[in-house]
Amino acid sequence: MNSTNASIRQTSFELPGQTNFYRGKVRDVYEIDNQYLVMVASDRISAFDVILPREIPGKGAILNTIAAFFLEMTRHEVPNWLMKVPDGRVSIGRKCDPFPVEMVIRGYLCGHALRQYNAGKRTLCGVEMPENMKPYEAFPEPIITPSTKAHEGHDEDISREEILSRRLVSEADYIILEKYTRQLFEAGSKYAKERGLILADTKFEFGKRDGTIYLIDEILTPDSSRYFYEEGYKEHIAAGTTPIQLSKEFVREWLMANGFQGLEGQKIPEMTDEVVTMIVNRYKELFKLVTGQDFETLKMVSSLPELEKKIAEALKSL
């Protein structure tokens, strides 16, 4: 089996010191000795908070490797959870107590913000959006629009005021979360520009351990971020057309075009081999653009037993 073509739907490992297990939308998370987390990025794909029926081969390794790339790049600015990447699909790091909010930051009017804007709303998460904005246009300054984290179902928009009044995060910690969010977005935007891309929006998650706030989970991947090609962007805005995107938004757009938005009673459209191949190629393209490497260079073992053994070996040296 070629490891670059194999897909992983899910794992069921029994790792040394394993104390808990959680299966997220796309990651299988193993807790070790109540101190560390092993995150295995599967090839599941979700949209509108629904896990789609087919895997995208190699997607997990692409997302995990891009996230590790950016976690290393920004480590000097913001402390993060990552300690080891023993395989393209696997990250091992510190277990933190996660804050119950996601820090979404938007530099451009697109995605959820654009859908709200088109519905006539001019306030998102307590933040005012200017009148007369064009779709996909840059905000005067990036805006932070947090959401609550849902283990199942849809995340919900929430304002800074609500977060503080409901005591989801202390004010002192929230000030740090905002600061880190802006620093990370600035660093990601600068790097994207060097690669001919525009970072339109993204989200970050944070946790706390021993009094220190850490950046956790993935960052700046196409599952958590939206990128535009810089080339042709201005022409698209002037013409009122959609800039070429490298993000998971194209999956959502395909689903919407086929009558699915995650609403009750709606049926997920058939994901043909052609659709899966299209999605795979988009992920590979972003990987190449972001890292400068070809997908085929990723170091991955080719079977689940080999992967379990590789993780166990990595845990020994923690």
Image: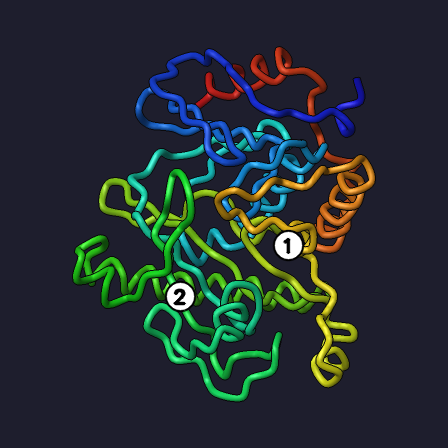
Please tell me how crowded label 2 is: few (under 14), some (14-19), or many (20+) other residues with Cα within 10 Å: many
Q: Is residue 268 above or below residue 288?
A: above
Quadrant in which the N terminus is drawn: top right
Measure the alpha-carbon separation of dots 2 and 1: 23 Å
Residue type, label 1 = Met
Residue 52 placement (x, y as % from top left)? 61, 37
- Foreground of the two, 58 or 92: 58
Q: Is residue 125 above or below residue 156?
A: below
* Circles 2, 1 touching at the beta carbon (< 8 Å): no
88 relative position to 102: left or right: right
Q: Is residue 71 above or below residue 44?
A: below
Residue 278 placement (x, y as % from top left)? 79, 45
Q: Which residue is mark 1?
A: 256
- Foreground of the two, 264 or 204: 264
Hey, which quadrant is residue 267 in on the image? top right
- Foreground of the two, 75 or 302: 302
Please tell me how crowded label 1 is: few (under 14), some (14-19), or many (20+) other residues with Cα within 10 Å: some
Q: Earlier in the sequence, mark 2 or mark 1?
A: 2
Front position among marks 2 and 1? 1
- Foreground of the two, 177 or 203: 203
Residue found 67% across the figure and 32% down from its top: 54
Residue 34 placement (x, y as % from top left)? 30, 24
As helix, strand or loop, the secondary structure at mark 1 comes to: helix
167 relative position to 271: left or right: left
Q: Which residue is mark 2?
A: 145
Q: State the residue lying farthest toward the bottom.
A: 132
Residue 165: mark in rendering? none
Identify the image's colour scheme: rainbow, by chain, secondary structure or one colour.
rainbow
Q: Is residue 44 above or below residue 275?
A: above
Residue type, label 2 = Thr
Residue 33 placement (x, y as % from top left)? 33, 20
Quadrant in which the C terminus is drawn: top left
